[in-house]
Image (cartoon, helix red, strand yellow):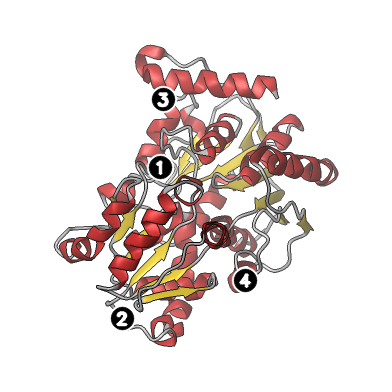
Amino acid sequence: MSETPAPADDPRPMRAVRHVMSVVGARPNFMKTAPVIAALARRPDPVRHTLVHTGQHYDAAMSRVFLDELGVGEPNHMLDVGSGRHGAQTARVMERIEPILERERPDVLLVPGDVNSTVAAALVASKLDIPVAHIEAGLRSYDRSMPEEINRILTDQISSLLFTHSPEARRNLLREGVAGDRIHAIGNTMIDTLVAMRGRIRGLDAAAAHGLTPGAYLVVTLHRPALVDGPLLGAAVAALDGVAAEIPVVFPIHPRTASAMERRGLAFSAPGMRLIEPLGYLEFLSLLETAAGALTDSGGIQEEATYLGIPCFTLRDNTERPVTCELGTNVLLGLAPERIAEVPGLIEAARDRPATVPPGWDGAAAERLVDVLEAGVPEWEPPPAPDERAAGADGAGTARFAADVVRRL
């Protein structure tokens, strides 16, 4: 499914890949990486694989459970960086992964997503002349107030291989001056995990376990700083209480959100509100699969809901996954808690809205990714200066911004 493979007579040297190191740190990273580890192991001549867990998510329900459920096993290296301010957390990952990279010297470092662990590991590897491969490259919200957006831009600019899951990601990268032959459309590895686990997910029947009627409840996840750390949280809690009077609401609450509510003395009062502890991957997907709809500010749930055909309502002004709105089930509500009140009506309206699963979200993305790795990793070359007439001001500005930041590090 790679759109622009390097031509056979490409004079650039290629590094053979016999050792892959993967870095995970937060919940979605595990689902994006697990199928790649499995695909590497299935090859007739499997390569060595090393797993590094940064510990960015350190709560057992948010981290340990996912590794256990996905069958990945114990990480080879656990960095235990924990939570903290962005700069401190990123610095701890860089400090702790550098000696591991120097000792292990993998042929390629595989980093998924857009969390601090992603960019930190990529920066260290690039300085050690270890090629970086980015899973889920090219996603852009064009909102630089989001730390994840900075992480995406920087990681993409220093990656040798960029694995995309939707057409707009390739367009974004080309606008930013990334060479086309480094970009490979492989599909969505996170959906690979969902496809592989579908039988187990259905077998759990999480709705019944929580006393819920399939197709008659709303699943909620809210955790992003723009909502949780500011004055909007109180309005969101009040609006959700109102919705819970119309339809049962189940809310596996993120530790960050629970702490913010406690600090501000906020609490739910509606009888229809089920506030529960964070769930494991399988149990959460089982709840999502039989929900009437999902309200979220998460990126990954937009994708999972789209694949499952569940109406999804995203409480953000933008999304780095526009394909979930264009083809899938996702609707942007804006960062507007008052719109939560519309969700029951929007669920009804969504029944008549056509939705499809994006191309490449088929359970085979990891196999396509490993096909690319088996062909080797191109040696690093500085990307060409972006053509401002072709790229547009935003694309050229992004490339200059990223290059300048990398030079200053």
- The answer for how far apart the CA atoms under marks 3 and 2 are is 44 Å
Viewer-closest of 97 and 179: 97
Residue at left offset 37%, top offset 54%:
235
Q: Secondary structure at mark 4?
A: helix
- Between residues 235 and 335, which one lies in front from this camera angle? 235
Which amino acid type is shown beneath numbered disc 2? Pro
Residue 65 is tagged as 4
Q: Dot 4, crowdedness within 10 Å: few (<14), some or many (≥20)?
A: some
Q: Please report whichever mark, 3 or 2, sits nearer to the chain's N-terminal start.
A: 3
Residue 300 appears at what percent x and percent y?
45, 55
Q: Residue 365's x, y, as percent?
A: 47, 55
Residue linked to disc 3: 175
Report helix, strand or loop for mark 2: loop
Q: Position of residue 152 (x, y in %)?
A: 53, 37
Q: Nearer the viewer, mark 3 or mark 2?
A: 2
Q: Is residue 351 visible?
A: yes
> Mark 4 or mark 1: which comes first in sequence?
4
Name the disc covering residue 214, or none: 2
- Which of 72/147 is in front? 147
Label 2, residues with CA under 10 Å away: few <14, some 14-19, many ≥20? some
Image-based side of 307 in relation to 9, left or right: left
- Where 12 falls versus 214 (above or below)? above
Q: Which amino acid, mark 3? A: Arg
* In the depicted structure, whether residue 51 falls above or below residue 101: below
